[in-house]
Amino acid sequence: MPQEQGLRPLPHGEAPDYRFPELEARFGPLLPMDQGMQSRVYTTADGETVVKVYRNQRGEHQQEAGNLRRAGLGDWVLDAVQADGVEALIMRRFRGHPLRRSDVSRALPRLREILSTLHHAQQGRVNVAKVEERLRRFRSALAAYPLEDLFAAVEIPLAEGLLDQPASFCHLDLWHDNILISPAGDVMVIDWTKAAWDDPLRDLALLKTGTLDLLSADQSFAAALSFLPDQAHATLRRYRAYLAMTTLHDLYWFLMNEPYEFEGERDRKLPRTRHALARLPA
Ligand SMILES: Nc1ncnc2c1ncn2[C@@H]1O[C@H](COP(=O)(O)OP(=O)(O)O)[C@@H](O)[C@H]1O
Ligand SMILES: [Mg+2]
């Protein structure tokens, strides 16, 4: 499938022709529909059901089913099965396509409702030790690059205790290809494998770098602010920290997984993040 204006890579070289006799005995012929980093997705012949086959066998089918239920989307889950030597999540198909640049603005109102409902429930606190540990990893891997401003944007609030907050249930993978929109403008967030309890502002930072940044820098920043629970100084600082953290995470990911794309990604992402950092209180 062509990745129009994609912000995220796909795995290289591909397409062995998989057969799923057990799954097909149950659901009928499976037609390839799409693929992401973690899975291949098929539809049934009537187009009503989606079979998501994971590339790994780590119990992600059960985990994603559980996360969908936790997020109030249990009605979409039909089953989570092991068959044909793979793990698969069976879901109802949402009639829509992943967000493209031209869809972002009209998706915003519904997306704001979905995320504010999702983030409403709180449980436990953010695992600050994990943030510190991640930051150490990013520091050592990215030491050769001038990113002091991004590190400072996280480390200073972190040292002040600003990241020690209540945790909300978060999606943690709010890329545009995980947000579907129907012709009528209904929105559905899919791909809940990474969902976990964390700082909702981390989720909103991921939404900016993964989706809102399809828009121009100024539009993206304005849209990003419209998702924040309030515009208090401390909220804006914490959001700033997570924008920097998310960008460091993306750069680290490219360095480790797609080193040839690192420089291009860095040159695309850093100006966007710096545009936002300059407009938020340090
Ligand atoms: N329930 C669904 N309804 C419609 N399309 C879906 C559904 N689930 C997945 N898809 C399509 O398959 C793609 C990959 O699914 P996703 O859950 O995002 O897997 P991955 O973890 O591999 O990214 C999505 O971007 C979307 O286009
Ligand atoms: Mg996906």
Image (cartoon, rainbow, N blue to C red):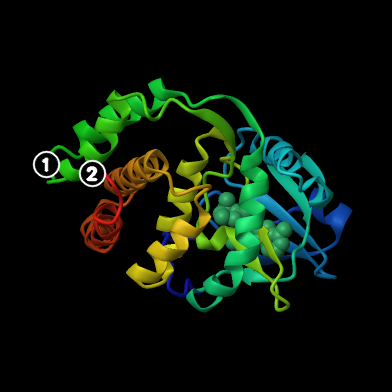
Task: Report x, y in % for residue 107.
Answer: 60, 69
> Ligand 2 appears in which quadrant?
bottom right
Secondary structure found at label 2:
helix
The amino acid on which the numbered mark 2 sits, given as a three-letter code, is Leu
Q: Is residue 269 above or below residue 5?
A: above
The amino acid on which the numbered mark 1 sits, given as a three-letter code, is Ala
Residue drawn at the location 82% of the way across and 56% of the way down: 24
Q: Is residue 135 left or right of residue 84?
A: left
Q: Quadrant of the C terminus?
A: top left
Task: Report x, y in % for residue 59.
Answer: 66, 33
Labels 1 and 2 touching (C-beta < 8 A)? no
Q: Residues within 10 Å of mark 2 (few under 14, many from 20)?
A: many
The single residue placed furthest to the right in the displayed view is 26
Secondary structure found at label 1:
loop
Residue drawn at the location 59% of the way across and 74% of the way down: 106
Closer to the camera, 188 or 265?
Answer: 188
Residue drawn at the location 49% of the way across and 48% of the way down: 230
Precedes in sequence: disc 1 or disc 2: 1
Closer to the camera, 228 or 64?
Answer: 228
Q: Quadrant of the N terminus?
A: bottom right
Task: Report x, y in % for residue 155.
Answer: 26, 31
Location of residue 222 by image quarter: bottom left
Q: Which residue is mark 1?
A: 144
Q: Is residue 233 left or right of residue 189?
A: left
Location of residue 129 by image quarter: top left
Q: Is residue 164 visible?
A: yes
The tag on residue 150 is 2
Marks 1/2: CA distance? 14 Å
Q: Is residue 80 above or below residue 15?
A: above
Task: Report x, y in % for residue 254.
Answer: 31, 49
Location of residue 95 by image quarter: bottom right
Q: Residues within 10 Å of mark 1 (few under 14, many from 20)?
A: few
